[in-house]
């Protein structure tokens, strides 16, 4: 045995699992003292990652869990690219600018060649930037009128957590319209009830996290046009198109939700959701350059050139942006439509199959005109079943499927629903295997009735990612 001196126990002949290093547990808290064999450490970490489960079976997430081999190769080639360093990596920066122009075109900006926008680490950062621009524009307008600027508010429906963060971090009152009865999304009437001179903007969501539906952007925009006619209040819209921004243009092109509506001043979307880029890609684009207040743009010159930046982060990886550009060229509008329409068909298939099982009422069935490729259901009023949706989620988990159950936000916390997201890589055949497991789950509960159904207090937590 070729033992080296000192405390390293290393031999090129050792089988990884026969090595002395892996005969002990590895450090979990104390900063390690000695070096270790990279093969051994790699194997131990790879094996630990196995316990994370299989992301392709995670039907809770909106994020990409499948990429093609070319993307893996581009990510590898881009491992050293720093998105912020536009002087050292001018071509990566150029690819980012092309993506912004293409998105401005896709979302019908009146001036896609010249408008502004940027990549971010995800929709959360993009939403913060969109929200900040709204706050700055409102403040400038109010200051010019000599009016107070200390009570900004933002109107929205049941939003993703990033808007709660925006409101708290940047000191804006969030007027989140509560749900009522069967109304599980925002509507124009509720917006008007809350709009006033301190409203910095309205944020409809294209693809609400909870029920997957599109909120009626045009109806809200029309109502705000009328409000302006009646009162002079001119309230802009930012659309949270985290999912829908990469779906509606391909699968519901006639739906007017974007810069076709002059009141829509900015849009955020997640490249790493239905943009099909690997994790770490978001976008925010303004309708026209003048919609982004210039005070928010920083000019940095210490990396070599003079670079205007608008972002919360500084250094961040460039590979996701390169991969995003690859997707745009590789797929085009037709390719995106093909992939997403296949997902819609699978979502509709699942919704028919789950409805046929009997005890469930479908709340959203994967209709491409009114929401994202997903479905959501609840247990029918008065259905005689022993289990809760949390029990179903728990049982499906034993086959690796993550099908989250959760309660709705205010004022429908009483309502528990379950949801499946259908993404690139969830084929109809894979979905049919899930249906088989769903049937087996209900059969199991027939023969083994649940005596104490699980509830949201049992720590069956999940993230609306
Ligand atoms: C996912 C999501 C977000 C947050 O996006 P990230 O890309 O995960 O930061 C914001 N809003 C909506 C509607 C979402 O679905």
Image (cartoon, rainbow, N blue to C red):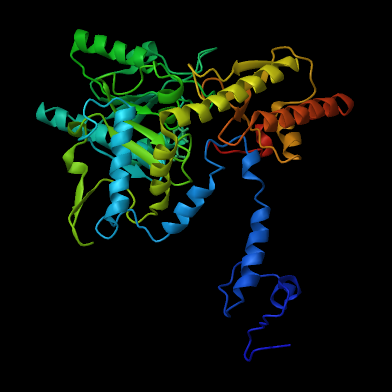
Look at the image and tell me in which quarter the N terminus lies. bottom right
Q: Quadrant of residue 135?
A: top left
Taking the spot 33% from the left edge, 40% from the top edge, the residue there is 99
The tally of labels here is 0
Q: In front: 401, or 334?
A: 334
Q: As drawn, is 11 to the left or to the right of 371?
A: right
At a point 37% along the width and 10% down the height, the residue shown is 189
198 relative to 71 in the view: left or right: left
Residue 399, placed above or below residue 37: above
Q: Residue furthest right?
A: 447
31 or 76: nearer the viewer:
76
Q: Is residue 80 above or below residue 328?
A: below
Percent of width and height locating residue 235: 25, 21
Q: Quadrant of residue 232?
A: top left
Q: Is residue 172 visible?
A: no
Could you say where residue 330 lies in the image, as x and y percent from the top left?
43, 39
Give the left or right position of residue 410, taking residue 110 as reference: right
The part of the image, by quadrant, that contains residue 187 is: top left
Please state the horizontal and vertical placement of residue 425, each as a whole percent of the image. 59, 37
Q: Residue most toward the bottom? A: 5
Tell me if residue 321 can be seen: yes
- Towards the viewer: 91 or 217: 91
x, y percent for residue 286: 26, 32
Q: Splitting the image into four quadrants, where does ligand 1 fall?
A: top left
């Amino acid at each position: 045995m070729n033992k080296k001196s000192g405390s390293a126990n290393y031999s090129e002949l050792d089988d990884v699992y026969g090595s002395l290093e892996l005969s002990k547990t590895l450090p979990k808290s104390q900063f390690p003292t000695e070096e270790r064999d990279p093969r051994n450490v790699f194997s131990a970490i790879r094996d630990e990652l196995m316990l994370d489960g299989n992301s392709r079976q995670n039907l809770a997430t909106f994020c990409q869990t499948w990429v093609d081999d070319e993307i893996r190769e581009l990510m590898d080639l881009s491992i050293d690219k720093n998105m912020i360093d536009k002087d050292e990596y001018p071509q990566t920066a150029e690819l980012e600018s092309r993506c912004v122009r293409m998105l401005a075109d896709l979302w019908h900006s009146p001036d896609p060649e010249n408008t502004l926008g940027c990549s971010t680490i995800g929709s959360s950062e993009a939403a913060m930037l969109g929200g900040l621009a709204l706050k700055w524009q409102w403040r400038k307008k109010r200051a010019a009128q000599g009016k107070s600027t200390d009570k900004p508010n933002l109107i929205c429906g049941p939003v993703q957590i990033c808007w709660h963060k925006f409101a708290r971090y940047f000191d804006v009152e969030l007027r989140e319209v509560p749900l009522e009865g069967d109304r599980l999304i925002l509507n124009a009437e509720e917006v008007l009830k809350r709009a006033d001179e301190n409203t910095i903007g309205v944020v409809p969501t294209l693809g609400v996290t909870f029920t997957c539906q599109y909120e009626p952007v045009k109806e809200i925009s029309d109502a705000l046009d009328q409000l302006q006619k009646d009162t002079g209040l001119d309230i802009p819209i930012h659309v949270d198109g985290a999912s829908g921004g990469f779906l509606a243009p391909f699968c519901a092109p006639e739906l007017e939700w974007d810069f076709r509506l002059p009141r829509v001043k900015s849009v955020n979307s997640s490249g790493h959701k239905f943009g099909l880029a690997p994790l770490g890609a978001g976008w925010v684009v303004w309708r026209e350059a003048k919609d982004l207040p210039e005070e928010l743009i920083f000019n940095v010159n210490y990396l070599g050139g003079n670079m205007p930046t608008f972002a919360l982060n500084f250094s961040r990886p460039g590979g996701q942006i390169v991969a995003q550009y690859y997707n745009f060229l590789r797929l085009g509008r037709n390719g995106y439509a093909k992939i997403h329409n296949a997902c819609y068909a699978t979502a509709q298939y699942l919704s028919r199959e789950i409805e046929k099982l009997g005890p469930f009422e479908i709340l959203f069935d994967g209709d491409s005109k009114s929401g994202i490729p997903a479905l959501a259901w609840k247990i029918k009023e008065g259905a005689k079943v022993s289990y809760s949706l949390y029990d179903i989620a728990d049982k499906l988990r034993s086959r690796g499927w993550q099908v989250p159950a959760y309660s709705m936000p205010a004022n429908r916390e009483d309502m528990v629903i379950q949801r499946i997201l259908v993404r690139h890589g969830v084929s109809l055949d894979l979905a049919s295997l899930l249906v088989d497991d769903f049937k087996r789950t209900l059969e199991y509960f027939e023969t083994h009735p649940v005596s104490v159904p699980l509830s949201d207090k049992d720590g069956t937590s999940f993230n609306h990612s």
